[in-house]
Image (cartoon, rainbow, N blue to C red):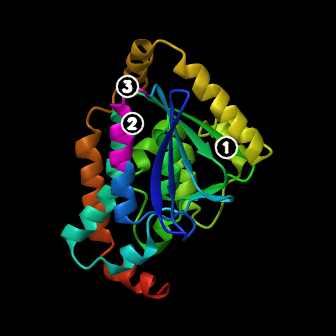
Amino acid sequence: MEAYVSLTITNNVGYIEFYHPNRNSMPSDVLLKLEQTITDAGSNDSIKVIVLKSGGNRTFCAGASFNEVIAIDNEVSGKQFFLGFANVINAMRKCPKLIIGRVQGKTVGGGVGLAAATDYCLASKFASIRLSELSIGIGPFVIEPAVSRKIGVNAMSQMTIDTETFFSVQFAKEKGLYAEVFETAEELDIAVSDLAEKLASYNPEAITEMKKVFWKGTENWDALLAERAEMSGKLVLSKFTKKTLKRFR
């Protein structure tokens, strides 16, 4: 199957699904389409609540496209690449609709940032999480504000330093990334749709105002995440990182 981003509307719930055949890794074109789809869903009057999900069974998102990371050869293209996840997170933050995350499997790097940027996240028992960026010479700079906001600086630091560990779904739930964890994808889907349709029946004006309250204090994130993208764009060109990336070609 080819990569895609789709939007389907059922009972006033907008289901946004992204997919990439390489474990749902996210190249720039998919990130751009995801950002635009979230923005469009936020302004669509027939959508009251949004669900963010990915295709496939056991991987929610493998993070940034490794092939694109390896191909970066200047600071401008480096910043532009890392702005991909920054722009999606900011689109989620500024969207006037509540966004429910549906995480059915493992998630790495930028995928953890997407889960953290949802307003409420449900997961399956297979949804372990990992931040591996520091091991290749960069860091999870762009997603850090979203992840730290959701699970706290201590848990974020632990994951960032222990780059080789997939932290368990129980860890993610205890730290607040996931609200509930389910045994099967079928149970997860039922819970997601039930919650989303219930929220869709609530006063949309109240939900919009509540979302503003949830995200209070993040008004500087457009500039902050752009600065973080520039930082990552420079580090990916460092001798250490280039040498490390060669091992993955």
Residue 41 marker: 2
Element carrying mark 1: strand
Q: Is residue 147 above or below residue 229?
A: above
- Main SS class of the magenta portion in the image: helix
Q: Of callouts 1 and 2, which one flags the residue occurring earlier in the amino acid sequence?
A: 2
Mark-to-mark CA distance, 1 and 3: 28 Å
In the image, farthest residue toward the right: 183
Q: Is mark 2 in CB contact (under 8 Å) with mark 3?
A: no
Q: Is disc 1 in contact with disc 2, using a CB cutoff of under 8 Å?
A: no
Task: Tell me the amino acid under the disc marked 1.
Answer: Ala
Q: Position of residue 127 (x, y in %)?
A: 67, 52
- Segment colored magenta: 35-46
The local secondary structure at tag 3 comes to loop
Above or below, 152 relative to 247: above
| Amino acid type, callout 3 | Asp
Residue 52 relative to residue 174: left or right: left
Q: What secondary structure is found at the residue carrying circle 2?
A: helix
Q: Which disc number belongs to residue 36?
A: none
Residue that mark 3 sits on? 45
Q: Any magenta on residue 129?
A: no
Quadrant housing the N terminus = bottom right
Above or below 191: residue 213: above
**Residue 130 seen:** no
Residue plotted at (70% across, 33% down): 191
- Sort mark 3 into few (<14), some (14-19) or many (20+) by Cα contacts within 10 Å: few
Label 1 belongs to which residue? 123
Q: Amino acid at mark 2?
A: Ala
Q: Position of residue 92 (x, y in %)?
A: 39, 39
